[in-house]
Amino acid sequence: MDAPLTPAPGRSGAPQGGAGGPGRRGRAARERGVSGRAPLALLVPAVLGLAFLVLPLAGLLVRAPWPTLLRRLAEPYVLEALRLSLVCATLATAVCLVLGVPLAWLLARVAFPGRRVVRALVTVPLVLPPVVGGVALLLVLGRRGLLGQWLESAFGVTLPFTTAGVVVAEAFVAMPFLVISVEGALRGADRRYEEAAATLGASRWTVFRRVTLPLIAPGVAAGAVLCWARALGEFGATITFAGNFPGTTRTMPLAVYLALETEPEAAIVLSLVLLAVSVAILAGLRDRWVNAS
């Protein structure tokens, strides 16, 4: 009677790399080789890059007039610019949500000729200089613009150099952030839930409202926060299309620019407010962006 065959060590019949086995030790060695001590040729520019990004922000903290900070923050023009910035950024975000979420759904769910071109056009404001965006808005929505002259003659609506113009300028530069975020969430969502709801007789609007939106809610929220932060910091398109009028169009970035010429310490205080908002935004999105692997 033949003896039972036993697989030889190291062959395919035996388990490889158990706890502490050669396979696991080999993987650990490879990981140490990849993620171990960084070569000097990469470490030096990495440290310089970090210093290049962090030192200017640290300069704001070092040069800030801390003893008079609260008094300067309570000055009327600071509170006025802050209030206007918060209101306009919130309204611009609302406009972006109303228009941007359906646009993102169209790009993610509907196949139509020229979809790539439309997606490219949607992202143009991301790379377009904001001043050029302001000029483009003037040519279209200005008093003599393609649509602006019709709005003024038919409805008496004038957008340039008004608070509404600030909202339009901020929405123009901020909407791509929302569209990209929501489109990515839509592409990553499991469509089986939508198909199941449609099979049960739900209309397309009901599927979108009751199934799709809850699925992509984190993406919509993240896109809205990024959109709001971008609108809050908008400068170029705002000053070109809406001007720089106190209480009407002078937002925080415009107030920083003006204060830098006359009262640098006030500019530092206003910059600290915007820096604090930016840090708060990053802290709120850390689980989605900063710690993403």
Image (tube, rainbow, N blue to C red):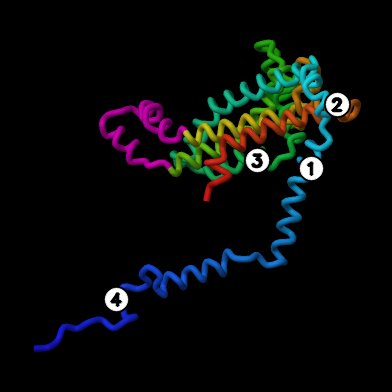
Q: Residue 162: give x, y in percent of width and height.
A: 74, 17
Q: Secondary structure at mark 3?
A: helix
Q: Amino acid at mark 3?
A: Val
What is the quadrant of residue 79 in the picture? Answer: top right
Task: Decide if residue 161 is in sight here.
Answer: no
Q: Which residue is mark 1?
A: 56
Q: Secondary structure at mark 4?
A: loop
Q: Which residue is mark 4?
A: 14
Q: Earlier in the sequence, mark 2 or mark 1?
A: 1
Residue farthest along the right direction in this orientation: 262
Marks 3 and 1, how far apart in space? 29 Å
Residue at point 72%, 66% (across, down): 41
Marks 4 and 2, how far apart in space? 75 Å
Q: Nearer the viewer, mark 1 or mark 4?
A: 4
Q: Earlier in the sequence, mark 3 or mark 2?
A: 3
Q: Residues within 10 Å of mark 1 (few under 14, many from 20)?
A: few
Q: Earlier in the sequence, mark 3 or mark 1?
A: 1
Q: Which residue is mark 3?
A: 124
Seen in the image, is 40 located left or right of residue 27?
right
Q: Earlier in the sequence, mark 4 or mark 2?
A: 4
Which disc is residue 259 wearing?
Answer: 2
Residue at point 27%, 77% (across, down): 13
Q: Earlier in the sequence, mark 1 or mark 4?
A: 4
Marks 2 and 1, how far apart in space? 18 Å
Residue farthest along the bottom direction in this orientation: 1
